[in-house]
Amino acid sequence: MLRFLGILRPGQGASSSACCNYTLNLDILEPRDIAGIIGAIRVSLRSMGDGEISVSAYDTAWVALVKSMDGGDGPHFPSSIDWIVQNQLYDGSWGDCTFFYAHDRIINTLACVIALASWGIHAEKCEKGLSFIRENMWRLVKEDEDWMLVGFEIALPSLLEMAKDLDLDIPYDHPALQEIYDRRDLKLNKIPKDVLHSIPTTLLHSIEGMRGLDWKRLLNLRFSDGSFMSSPAATAYALMETGDRKCLEFLGTIVNKFNGGAPFLYPVEIYERLWAIDRLERLGISSYFTCEIDDYLTYVYRHWTEEGLGYTRDCAVKDIDDTAMAFRLLRLHGYHVSPCVFKRFEKEDGEFVVYPGQSNQSVSAMYNMYRAADQAAFPGDDGGVLRRARRYCRAFLQGRRASGQLSDKWLIAEGLPGEVAYGLDFPWKASLPRVETRMYLEQYGGGADVWIGKVLYRMHLFNNDLYLKMAKADFISFQRSSRAEWHGLQRWCDKNNLEMYGVTSERALRAYFLAAANIFERERAAERLGWAQTAVLAEAVTSHILSHSSSDNTRERILCRLASGSLKRGEKDSTAEDGLLNALNDLIDHLTSGNASDSLQRAWKQWLMEWTAENGSYKGHTALLLVRSVEICSGRLGSTEQNQKLPEYSQLEQLTYSICSKLGHGVHSQVCSLHTKNVENLDGQLDEEMQELAQSVSQISDPMNRVTKQTFLHVARSYCYVAHCSPETIDSHISKVLFEEVI
């Protein structure tokens, strides 16, 4: 199954060079194969365990250096030696086989050469590795500093000292190394040794590069699994210095799982579960894996703490990245988590940090924090920490974007600048699901994305080409269905001569797009068409009424004739009102039958009775008509009528009406005439109401159907989207979502 996934890993049945040559042929799989793809992804999700991560040659080399703990003269983990021997690349180096980064290749290669030379074996491989190091040392000063490996300035000088003791032929005085030595000295002088020995910090991740440590105190800082910060290299060094059995047990587990290899970090099950959910949701395919996602969220919530989360369940050092991702996903799926957790990541000067003592900021982590604050803020959140976090992260990301500095210290992804740009340009309340997915299909790097730790590494189960292939196939299928539905809507508009009432083809297309961009699942075509046809006809009726000087009389006349049923479909249109009523009867007959027809007719009567042309308030009533039409067309008729009696339903109606009334009547022209303070007040009111609406939708304890609650949110977000975007932007999104080929 893993071979089908295209994520065969080094150390799991193949050498790294074989892994480099094994790729998923994206031309083989077609949309008709989607059931097989779903099954393959589901198997991978259900078998995650403690996580899947690529092997680190650097960490494997440290494990290989451990002498036999049983009194022998050889290595305690001979399979780690075997892994090193089998995974040298064609140019003599070790490291990521498809992405060349000199820092990564040199530190991996030097560690592996030291391991082999220490045991006096494979001299030819050692020489080939040393030759690579000598030829590429100059590259260290030429590469992007934003991609600096974690602890590189500590680890490399330590390895060079070990290499010198082995008399390895390396240019130890190379100019490229001087800056690294200087950074090492600066960092070591800044490290508070008492803190290092007293509480868990990220410094424990790099202790293999430090000397003069108090191991009696440090052993008290091991994780419960026997590791130091889940790092095989750090734990191997601790084992060599102390002979601690818990360290040995941890390394034994790692070596057995990875067939002699060792990743730079393990386990990573919290991190991997969160990012897998995030990728599946943003790619628009999460509905296929609801059970797996529910299991993942249950696991994450079980390990949630008031201090946040780290990459694994027992991680004593929490970080804002994992915490923000977990907070957003848990909240939006109905779990109760407090935003107070982010106060521990906030400094006195207003900066938010990934973890205490960080040396530089992370674009991807601040983007995840921004998304959490933008999407999962609810009214009454204690202390305003999310508001402050959103303000800080937005300013930070805008500054980086303006200066073209969106490289990240933890992730090498070609699509990251596009992700950040979309998040800044389209806040959550004005972002439609299918638009976001269409953009993310171009931003998601699949198997090409590379992560930065002590070495470059890959996260196979949420960065792979199969996710991308499935998402593209699913989106192409959506486009095909959407175009067919759009053509049907066009024919219906032509049949009922709606252009006579001001409903142009462009207006009808926009109405369909707003419906399809929110309700996109294949089985929900009736709801999409219910939304689109209702929006189109409501616009026609509104246009007709407003075009008459005595609009109230016109509205009353239409209402009376609708109530009496005096005009039936098929009769000749003698007046403009006849045509509208014919179209309405046609819509009701087409979309519903039986009791549902009566319900839809009542919804239209209610709309006509409630709206007025003053101050644009009819827009709010039209939003409620859209909600009611979608719910009636969905087949949730019984639950809809029952829901209408609930106070929760009334609250959602009031919120949606208020939001859409504010947004629906020429918001941009209104704003231009208002003072800045009034504009800010209006934005603040809208934000608070949208947050309240999102909070209501996320709650899973009330008796209302969650899908019904989401309908209110979909309609409100569509109004926000139209108010936020220029006509040109909307047209470009329509083209991209419905018509442009997904490549």
Image: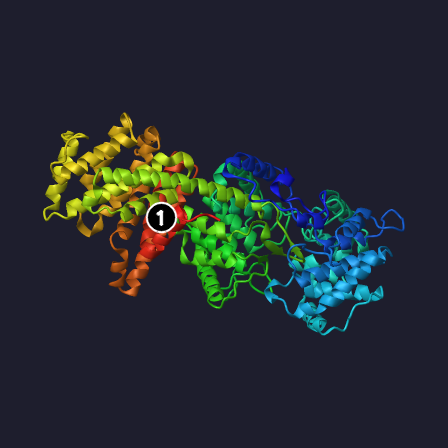
Q: Residues within 10 Å of mark 1 (few under 14, many from 20)?
A: many
Work out which residue is located at the far top of the displayed protein and give it: 594
Q: Which residue is mark 1?
A: 717
Check the image and report above or below for 585 versus 520.
above
Q: Residue at x 72, y 42 (%)?
A: 13
Check the image and report above or below for 50 versus 345.
above
Residue 433, percent from left and from top: 42, 46
Q: Observer-nearest residue: 207 or 5? A: 5
Q: Observer-nearest residue: 653 or 6? A: 6
Number of numbered labels in the structure image: 1
Q: Observer-nearest residue: 195 or 413? A: 413
Could one spot residue 195 in this view of the protein? no
Residue 516, percent from left and from top: 37, 42
| The N terminus: image quadrant | top right
Type of amino acid at the residue the image marks with label 1:
Arg
Instruction: Say what secondary structure mark 1 lies in.
Output: helix
Q: Relative to residue 349, is residue 608 drawn left or right?
A: left
Check the image and report above or below for 352 versus 604.
below
Check the image and report above or below for 86 versus 598.
below
